[in-house]
Image (cartoon, rainbow, N blue to C red):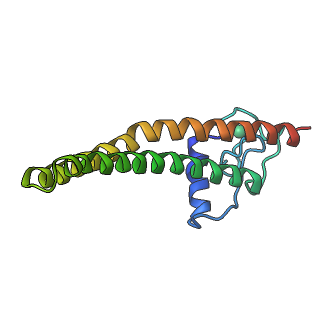
Amino acid sequence: MVSERLKALLDDILAGRAPNAGRFCGHCYQPLSEGRELCPHCGRSTPACAPVAAVPLEVIEMHRRRRGREGLVVRSVAWGGLSAGVVIALLPLAFADVQLWTVLAFFGLLAFFYLLSANLANSVGDALGYRWGYSLFRKRWERFVGRRDG
Ligand SMILES: [Zn+2]
């Protein structure tokens, strides 16, 4: 699969911060400096596996989908936690009417769930999103490599 360095470069290409041009390993598209004959990521040599001048659009597209999937999971966890928090924060108001303590509880619970869902999004959401994005990318990558290498 692709290296962390290529992932960072693909992020830059998607954001328009880097051109999709250079010298890349012909197997894993790891950026290779001029004259380098051995890919530091997958170990293939350039005489056996010719380097390419650009990352295939299909690889960029699968990376974009991977990032999209990761973001979707993180946002879903954040909004899910916040929505649950709003419902729970409204319970004292709904059952004990508007009083000082129910109003204070409302804002206190909102703040608590806001922090909780932000934390969950960054921990659980991040981990789940990473795994889901990774499995999506791996399937597409294997199909792509299978087709590319015949
Ligand atoms: Zn390589």
Does residue 33 appear in this view? yes
Q: Nearer the viewer, residue 16 or 121?
A: 121
Residue farthest along the left direction in this orientation: 100
Q: Quadrant of the N terminus?
A: top right
Q: With 67 as the anchor, is 104 left or right in this view?
A: left
Q: Nearer the viewer, residue 18 or 48?
A: 18
- Image quarter where the C terminus lies is top right
Against 13, is 104 above or below?
Answer: above
| Ligand 1, image quadrant it occupies | top right
Which residue is drawn at the image coordinates 16% and 53% (left, top)?
97
**What residue is drawn where x is 18% and y is 54%?**
107
Side of 106 relative to 44 (left or right): left
Residue 114 % position (x, y): 29, 50
Which residue extends farthest right? 150
| Apparent side of residue 43 relative to residue 127 in the rendered image (left or right) | right
* Residue 78 placement (x, y as % from top left): 40, 48
Q: How many marks?
A: 0
* 65 with respect to 25 (left or right): left
What residue appears at the point 59 percent right and 54 percent down from the top-left corner? 9
- The part of the image, by quadrant, that contains residue 120 is top left
Residue 70, given in percent of the width and then of the height, sits at 54, 46
Relative image position of residue 51 (x, y in whole percent): 78, 48
Q: Residue furthest bottom?
A: 16
**Nearer to me, 29 or 87:** 87
Q: Is residue 56 visible?
A: no
